[in-house]
Image (tube, rainbow, N blue to C red):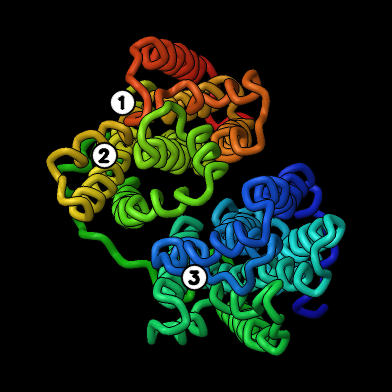
Amino acid sequence: MTALTGTGGLARLILRRDRFLMPVWALFLGLMPLNFVAATEELYPTAAAQENYARTTGESPTFLALYGPMHDTSIAAIVAQRSGFIPVMVALFCALTVIRHTRTEEEAGRRELLGATVIGRGAGLAAALLVTGGAALAIGIVLAGGMTAMGMPAAGSIAFGLQLALAGWVFTAVAGVAAQLTEGAGAARGIALTALGGAFVVRMAADAGGEGNGLSWLSWLSPLGWGTRLQAYGGEQWWVLAVPAAAVALLVAAAAYLTARRDVGAGILPPSLGPADAAPSLSGPFGLAWRLHSRGLYGWLAGFAALGVVWGGVAGTVQDMVADNPDLEEIFSRLGGGTGGIVDVYFGTVMGMMGVIAAGYAVSATLRMRAEETAQRAEPILATAVGRVRWAASHLVFALLGTAAVQAVGGLATGLTHGLDTGDVGGQLPRVTAAALAQLPAVWLIAAVTLALAGLVPRFSAAGGWGALAVAAVLTLFGAAFQADQWLLDVSPFTHIPKLPAQDAELAPFAWLTALVLVLGAAGLAGLRRRDMATG
């Protein structure tokens, strides 16, 4: 028996377990840029309009930092640049998938059961890398085929598809290494996501000032920068493929080396020993929940502060972007709502986006309760005088107040940055912060849906919670731009939030969204009290 014996069987098992989730993600990420083509052609129907857009965004450090460089003024090149954040999403999907099928399996004890059969030591890792890498390739093929079918240049479409696939392959391998380093899946996810965040920051620094900023060479240090160096639709540089190929080969070799030299269930990095006596703060469920959630909350707060600085900086360039393009102003108005100034409409748009992102933290914090339950760590707590509702409330505090904190930080950073840019901090700071906090009822509704599923049908809580967020995100971010019917837009709770500061605040949507949060939350807690623990 070799180290890879049984790889095929484990790969089929992964495909069976992810037979619904993986195709949905592959199609969603692969087809998303195709939706930009029609909208871009409508916004920029002439070569002059396309060149004006390229000139405007090409001179804006914030847009370059967010989306990366533009290598041509064609429709295809504009779409490729507007899709600059999608490689991050592909990398995130791949990293989480690998850790779920490697370190999470070990932490749950299932890897040891499979290891008792005719399964080689490296088969689990190899199967996870092969399947996830194949999914990344499928995303690239879907995108390349779709862009070619829409009449875009074939060579550029292949390079565009490879840009997404490369991000997935590199972070598939990064996650493979991370899974060998720690005993816990949470720590492995932290390592992989830190690497992804670092790569994105380096790529932003490299592209923020364009090719002449003196820091463009930094893109060679970022896996996300390697994809932009392919120059899709702008004179493709195929030799760049050698860089990510070498990186993937080295990372996969490192993961294989590490997995052969550790015990099953153990990590290369030894766990740090805690103090002999617990701190007084751990005497209750809220103290334990703080210990579990605090590090993640700090990361989200820092991320929203950085996001606010970027979005606040972009606001000053919005007026220039729409000055020569009334169609773009109309799209901004559809996204942001209202008939106020274009900067107010812009803030109405980005605060909705910020709310969607914050809902990701709300779902994650709510599902942590379910993760503690399935890992059998909840039962020892519930065996004491702590009741189920009190235990659940200790986690829900972070889903509710934690999201309020990250929204407040994001709004404050956005308003402060724009206020400093315009010399009106006192006027801009409170109104932009209020616009950010106005998204909370919609954010909390997504968390309430997740809680209701965790209490009533726990086996579907993760899929249902993230699925609800995905539907809301697609409708909020792309529905209006692609002129979706109003009944469909109304499915997203974010559609009903007044787009402050472009619209006037109305009490009714806040009231009924809050009522839905209370009803769903009560249903979830009632189900949790009555069902068996760790079922489904």
Q: From what the image shows, is residue 209 above or below residue 485?
A: below
> On the picture, is 34 further left or further right than 314?
right
Along the polypeptide, which appears first: circle 2 or circle 3? 3
Along the polypeptide, which appears first: circle 1 or circle 2? 1
> Does residue 307 appear in the picture of this structure?
yes
Of residue 129 and residue 494, the one placed in the foreground of this image is 494
Regarding mark 3 in the picture, which secondary structure is present there? loop
Regarding mark 1 in the picture, which secondary structure is present there? loop
For image coordinates 41% across by 54% down, the residue present is: 320
Q: Quadrant of residue 486?
A: top right
Q: List the residue tagged with mark 1.
A: 386
Question: What amino acid is at disc 2?
Answer: Ala
For image coordinates 53% across by 43% down, the residue present is: 326
Q: Which of marks 2 and 3 is in front?
A: 2
Question: What amino acid is at disc 1?
Answer: Val
Of residue 118 and residue 391, the one placed in the foreground of this image is 391
The quarter in which the C terminus is drawn is: top right
Kindly check if marks 2 and 3 are in contact, taking CB atoms under 8 A apart as contact: no
Q: Nearer the viewer, mark 1 or mark 2?
A: 2
> Does residue 25 appear in the picture of this structure?
no
Of residue 83 and residue 323, the one placed in the foreground of this image is 323
The quarter in which the N terminus is drawn is: bottom right
Q: In which quarter of the image is residue 462?
A: top right
Residue 508, position as x, y percentages in the image = 39, 10
Residue 44, position as x, y percentages in the image = 64, 52
Q: List the residue tagged with mark 2.
A: 408
Residue 431, position as x, y percentages in the image = 24, 34
Point out which mark residue 267 bears. 3
Local crowd size for mark 2, using a 10 Å CA cut-off: few (<14), some (14–19), many (≥20)? many
Q: From what the image shows, is residue 458 above or below residue 300?
A: above
Of residue 83 and residue 292, the one placed in the foreground of this image is 83
